[in-house]
């Protein structure tokens, strides 16, 4: 049974915190809406949503891990997981909606500090500015109506690429899209990078995770080896069970800058 424990208006629609047994979820516009973020109250690091674990697998395609950027906070499960599993990594989060940030602090256990920082700003505006490079960028920004249009275009993905460190990787979470929209998102994202791969989790999740890299992705057998090694390094065996497929995406970088 759903229990609404918090409801708050925001500049981008009403934000709901809903409990259902041991699980607590963040939803937009309706208590019955899609679950934007989920934690297990008895174990905040359990990561019930499989796409979060699949996104973490993108780290297997990075060469170093010292600075991470997450665009879109939700309840904060992904940045908090990184903070827990990677004690030497600095995690920065950009979130447009200040109400979401407050809800994550009050109801989802978000605790900021020297290694976990949250900035209230539009993700595209943040990335187009000059700043330090990131080894890993996770794009996970959604409203009740899906991903905002300006976070889907080629200029945005070029800025993502520009802010990656050598050997870095960017992961795009695609959800709440029709099949035609998914194909268009993958193609636009892939054009910004030297190479791109698709990661998918269990059938319970319809999310598609795209990983863009600054150099060719490894062949599939090598990826699985790296994923197993990453799971051992993180002490997170669920990681290897979460990814069910790895495949090279549509095309590599075209070479031309869309800014002309």
Image (cartoon, grey):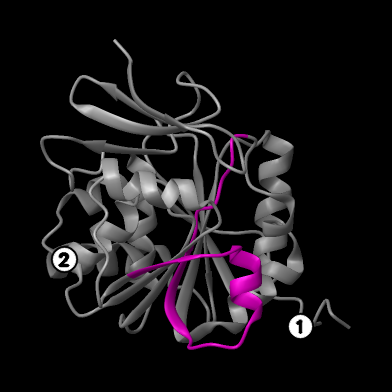
- The residues colored magenta run 117-144
- Which residue is found at the position 41% from the left and 52% from the top? 101
Circles 2 and 1: CB distance less than 8 Å?
A: no
Q: Can residue 243 be seen in this view?
A: no
Q: Which of 32 and 103 is in front in this view?
A: 103
Vertical placement of residue 174 versus 59, above or below: above
Whether residue 124 is in magenta: the answer is yes
Q: Which residue is most to the right?
A: 260
Of the 4 image quadrants, the one containing the C terminus is bottom right
> Residue 11 location, x and y as percent?
61, 44
> Residue 179 location, x and y as percent?
68, 35
Vertical placement of residue 208 versus 86, above or below: above
Give how far apart the Cα atoms at labels 2 and 1 are: 35 Å
Q: Which residue is most to the front?
A: 9
Quadrant assignment, res 87: bottom left
- Which residue is found at the position 62% from the left and 40% from the top? 146
For label 2, the residue is 234
N-terminal label among 2 and 1: 2
> Residue 66 location, x and y as percent?
31, 83
- Which residue is found at the position 55% from the left and 82% from the top? 163
Q: Is residue 100 visible?
A: yes
Judged left or right of residue 52, residue 94 is: right
Q: Is mark 1 on a helix, strand or loop?
A: loop
For label 1, the residue is 255
């Amino acid at each position: 049974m759903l229990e609404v424990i918090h409801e708050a208006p925001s500049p981008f629609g009403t934000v709901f915190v809903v409990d259902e047994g041991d699980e607590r979820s963040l939803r937009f516009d309706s208590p019955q809406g899609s679950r934007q973020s989920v934690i297990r109250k008895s174990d905040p690091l359990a990561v019930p949503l499989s796409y979060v674990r699949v996104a973490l697998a993108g780290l297997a395609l990075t060469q170093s891990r010292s600075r991470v950027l997450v665009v879109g906070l939700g309840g904060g499960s992904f940045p908090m997981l990184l903070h827990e599993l990677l004690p030497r990594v600095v995690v920065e989060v950009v979130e447009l909606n200040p109400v979401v940030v407050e809800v994550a602090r009050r109801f989802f256990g978000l605790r900021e500090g020297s290694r976990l920082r949250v900035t209230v700003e539009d993700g595209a505006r943040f990335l187009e500015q000059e700043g330090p490079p990131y080894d890993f960028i996770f794009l996970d920004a959604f409203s009740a109506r899906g991903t905002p249009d300006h976070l889907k275009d080629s200029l945005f993905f070029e800025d993502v690429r520009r802010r990656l460190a050598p050997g870095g990787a960017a992961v795009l979470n695609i959800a709440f899209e029709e099949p035609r929209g998914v194909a268009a998102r993958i193609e636009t994202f892939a054009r910004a990078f030297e190479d791109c791969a698709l990661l998918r989790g269990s059938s319970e999740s319809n999310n598609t995770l795209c990983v863009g890299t600054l150099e060719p992705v490894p062949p599939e057998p090598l990826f699985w080896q790296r994923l197993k090694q990453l799971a051992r390094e993180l002490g997170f065996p669920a990681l290897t069970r979460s990814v069910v497929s790895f495949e090279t995406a549509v095309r590599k970088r075209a070479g031309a800058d869309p800014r002309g």
